[in-house]
Image (cartoon, coloured by chain):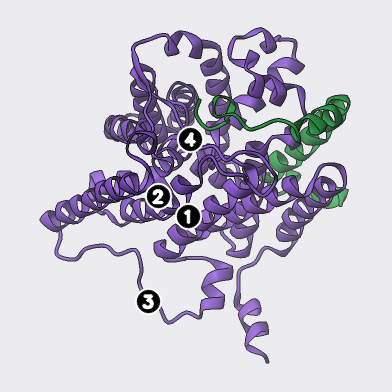
Chain colours: A purple, B green
Amino acid sequence: MSLFKKIFLQSKIDFPMLFFGTSILLFILFFLLINYSLKHFLLLIIGGALGFVLFHSSFGFTGSWRSFINERKGNGIRSQLLAIGLSMLLIVPFIGNESFFGSIIVGSFGPVGVSVIIGSFLFGLGMQLGGGCGSGTLYNVGAGNTRMLITLIFFILGSLLGTLHLPWWSSLPSFGVISLSSYISTVPTLIIQGILLIIIAMFTIFYEKRGKKNISTIYQKTDTSFFRVFVFGNWPLLWGAIAIALLSIIMIFIAGHTWSVTFALGLWGAKIASHIGIDVSQWEYWKGSYQAQALQRSILTDSVSLTNIGLLLGAFIASNLSGKNNSKINISLLPFFAAILGGILMGYGARLAFGCSIGALFSGIASGSMHGWLWLLFAFAGSYYGIKLRPYFKL
Amino acid sequence: MILFIIKKLKREKNITFLFLFLLFILLGFDHFNTKNNIYINLEEEGHLEHHAEDSPCGM
């Protein structure tokens, strides 16, 4: 028996569900290529790859921040810092250049102000109650987590409410957008931000050393073959960090903008609201040219929606390959309420903070925007209080 | 295919399966509902620059 056959026979693959997920993905890919363009086709593939990577490497902000606060385990945070640092090396120098499809590459920029402070705090609080950040919610829904499906539904509702109130929040005091590279040029931005990322990584090691003998690592060599780990999961965090950085870099050259998640959730909410008779096009947020166009067009033309849909399907496929997709309805009352509250706080907070852990933190810092750093500080504070609230919801 | 869907929903109460199926239907509905807008905007897209103020990620 060949090694390949042996590995597949020993696996826990759910073949019917794998077939279903792959069929939907291939159908949408084919549909995009026929009706839309190569750009849309590629964005769905990138989203799918992101979902696959996120699931197989269990790469998430919520759990790793909680592990750091509760157990002094910092490898998750260090893998995130590595991913941000690697992305930054290629994103900052290319902002303002032309993408593969002709549009100008834009970074993720938001104002340094009260709106981001409040929004990121609410987001941090919500992600600990909801059980995942923007990308974490999507990949966990794809992997069959029922509670996260509730979180996602209320995340969408919270995002929609956020779009209604954002103009008021934006009128609060702010220093405006602060892009480091426009003040001190590209190389000093990379050096200063690189040093900051290293300082945070060193702090996590120092903090971890005070509580434990062994420091958690982002890479551990195992006896399992590369093929088996790659296809069926349990990736080291190092693989996840490198893969996510590479995919986010490829994304900016195809989409023309950095990786974002929550804009699409607000858009989906606005679309649903429009279909049930609420005229969101009259809301100030949806009058902006980009937002208005996104509202008029099909969801399949929106680059952020495409990567989100791909992410869901990629995680669905990955979880069925590893036999870990457990979609049965199994949720008790208090965690159910936590999912509702967490979802609303995250959705609302993400709009106020101009993004989530991906759009504001990951892409913000990788673009050299100061709002990304502010987001990190206040979302971490919010997470701290969110973790304290978890026992009240039996989490 | 239809039998497979009914089995998954009835016996296994597979909620993710249902969600993905509904998402698939909604995408189709949205595509056909906005069909008249697609071609106009895709043509415009080629001529527009992607302004920072109009980005989905941030301002």
Query: Which is nearer the eye, A14 or A74?
Result: A74
Residue bearing mark 3:
A221
Return the x and y of residue A112 as percentages of the image width and height.
Answer: 35, 24
Q: Which residue is mark 4?
A: A108
Which structural element holds mark 4?
loop
Give the residue type at disc 3. Answer: Lys
In this picture, residue B9 sits left or right of residue A134: right
Q: Is label 1 in a helix, a strand or a loop?
A: helix
Quick one: label 4 or label 2, which is nearer the N terminus? 2
Q: B10 left or right of A379?
A: right
Horizontal and vertical percent position of residue A252: 57, 46
Q: Residue at x 83, y 52 (%)?
A: A30
Q: Label 3 near label 2: C-beta < 8 Å?
A: no
Q: State the separation of the CA atoms marked 3 and 1.
A: 21 Å
Q: CA distance from mark 1 to mark 4?
A: 15 Å
| Residue at x 53% of width, y 28% of height | A155
Residue at the farthest left position: A210
Label 3 Cα neighbours within 10 Å, binned few <14 / some 14-19 / many ≥20: few
Residue placed under numbered mark 2 in the picture: A84
